[in-house]
Amino acid sequence: LEVTAECGNAIESGNFLRSHRVDLIFLDIQMPEIDGLQFVGTLKDPPAIIFTTAFRDFAPEAFELDVIDYLLKPISFERFVKAVNKFFERQANSPSKLIELGDVNFIYLKSDRKIHKIAIADITFIESMDEYVKVHLQNKVLVTRESITSLQKRLSAHAFVRIHRSFMIATKFISSVSSDGVEVAGKLLPFGRAYKLSALAGLGIRPL
């Protein structure tokens, strides 16, 4: 690990992220200006996150954000190393590293022991299910071991919005938005509590 910066609040961190590439953030929750949970929700393309906090109560909301780990202070070195190893394992197992091609209209996914070339325009929404992710297309569903956060980074330049720890949607397939969630391709997908405000902002909609 190489420490690239130490920031005292979320605004300082956001400014640094706009001009530097960061792979992993160790993030506190109770901070000045904006708390850690809100800060992650403001990031369009967040790095991997390991929360470091003295408060146990925020763990459910933190894991909704698909973080690597949640460390309670005081943090032992053994527990720190375990969290860092989780980060490296996720990086090593990302199927997106298998192929690097420049066609911006397609992505490549490993599924059923094959590499599938997928037209981005055909993706309706993406659903995370523990260790697997379902990529819902207009005419079929592919299951891959790639994480939803990894796919979010790959699709960040396109019209996709993360609305829940488990759901990312293609905005072109939205038919309606309500306080209950977003209707996409005939299915009502719920907002995650930690994602709702940033998702509505990404859609250009005032809070419901």
Image (cartoon, rainbow, N blue to C red):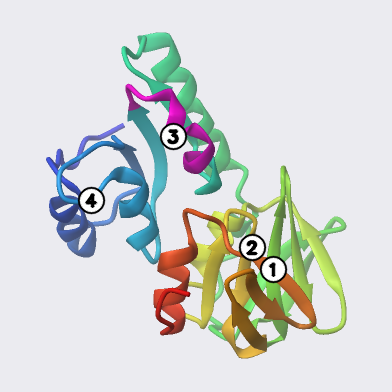
Q: Secondary structure at mark 1?
A: strand
Residue type beneath disc 1: Leu
Q: Position of residue 68 (x, y in %)?
A: 49, 37
**Residue at point 23%, 51% (across, down):** 34
Q: On the image, numbered disc 1 is attached to which residue?
A: 189
1 and 2 marks in contact (CB < 8 Å) = yes
> Which label lies toward us, 2 or 3?
3
Question: Mark 4 or mark 2, which has the lower sequence index?
Answer: 4
Determine which of the numbered discs, if any, sits on residue 167 in the image: 2
Q: Nearer the viewer, residue 3 or 16?
A: 16
Depth check: give the residue in front, 203 or 2.
203
For residue 58, the mark is: 3
Q: Nearer the viewer, mark 1 or mark 2?
A: 1
Q: Which residues are magenta?
A: 53-62
Magenta stretch: includes residue 143: no
Nearer to us: label 4 or label 2: 4
Q: Is residue 74 left or right of residue 193?
A: left
Q: Is residue 5 visible?
A: yes
Residue carrying label 4 = 34
* Foreground of the two, 206 or 22: 206
